[in-house]
Image (tube, rainbow, N blue to C red):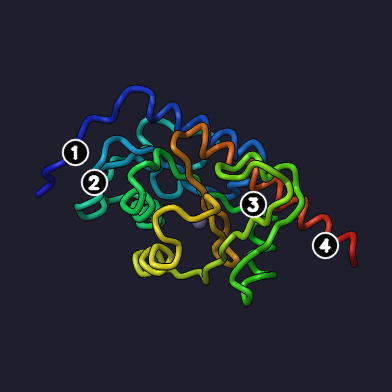
């Protein structure tokens, strides 16, 4: 029996819908991929329903999930990855996930290394904890897995609650990032996507 299901607070659907539309407009969530969530309280979060067009998220497309209860029907298959982040770090207020071309291609290219190192970009400063381009941003890469509960456990045991970079790649899959607020998560999404696009373009130039 469900014991903890708060009412969805005002504005949560709008915040998730706005970030979904932002990502969809840039081609980062093709074919209903990607998912977005927002913390509701210390024990629950709201996340997009499975197979929803992210450019047109409505109230019926956002589902409440309690961290310590079974996932409700219809929720995104990747909800365990979001839940694990919220459970690991109580300061996280939003999680964003997308399948951009740059994230997908680079995550495959560096899958064996398990990390993508980005160096010398001014855009590092878009990420919390980075104050200069003179830094190395080491974005972890994990092997993809359709068992997202097992994947989440593996990721969290490696990352720890607050990794140096607020994000990770899933090989051949896409990017996860998060922040204290949805605005932070969205800035990290945009900043990391910019860095990944630069890196991909640079590698093309070198060929
Ligand atoms: Zn995905």
**Where 157 sits versus 56, above or below?**
below
Instruction: Determine the CA span between mark 1 and mark 4.
Output: 48 Å
Q: Residue at x 48, y 45 (%)?
A: 178
Q: Secondary structure at mark 1?
A: loop
Disc count in the image? 4
Q: Nearer the viewer, mark 1 or mark 4?
A: 4
Q: Nearer the viewer, mark 4 or mark 3?
A: 4
**Where 28 sits versus 108, above or below?**
above
Instruction: Determine the CA span between mark 3 and mark 2.
Output: 29 Å
Residues under numbered marks 1 and 2 in contact, where contact means CB atoms less than 8 Å apart: yes
Residues under numbered marks 1 and 4 in contact, where contact means CB atoms less than 8 Å apart: no
Q: Secondary structure at mark 3?
A: loop
Quarter of the picture holding the C terminus:
bottom right
Q: Which sits in the foreground, 135 or 38? A: 135
Percent coordinates x, y for residue 1 in the rendering? 9, 49
Which residue extends farthest bottom? 112
Q: Which sits in the foreground, 141 or 64? A: 141
């Amino acid at each position: 029996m469900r014991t903890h299901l708060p009412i969805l607070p005002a504005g949560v659907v709008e915040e998730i819908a706005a970030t979904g539309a932002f990502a969809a407009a840039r081609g980062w969530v093709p074919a209903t991929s990607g998912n977005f969530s927002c913390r509701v309280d210390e024990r629950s979060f709201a996340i997009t329903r499975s197979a929803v067009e992210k450019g047109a998220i409505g109230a019926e497309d956002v589902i409440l999930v309690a961290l310590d209860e079974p996932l409700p029907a219809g929720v995104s298959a990747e909800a365990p990855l979001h839940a694990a982040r919220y459970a690991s770090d109580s300061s996280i207020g939003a999680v964003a996930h997308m399948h951009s071309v740059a994230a997908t291609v680079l995550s495959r290219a560096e899958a064996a290394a398990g990390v993508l190192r980005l160096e010398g970009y001014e855009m590092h400063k878009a990420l919390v904890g980075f104050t200069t381009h003179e830094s190395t941003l080491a974005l972890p890469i994990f092997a993809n897995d359709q068992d997202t509960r097992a994947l989440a456990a593996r990721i969290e045991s490696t990352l720890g609650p607050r990794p140096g970079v607020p994000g990770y790649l899933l090989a051949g899959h896409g990017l996860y990032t998060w922040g204290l607020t949805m605005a932070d998560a969205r800035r990290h999404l945009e900043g990391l996507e910019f860095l990944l696009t630069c890196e991909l373009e640079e590698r093309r130039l070198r060929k």
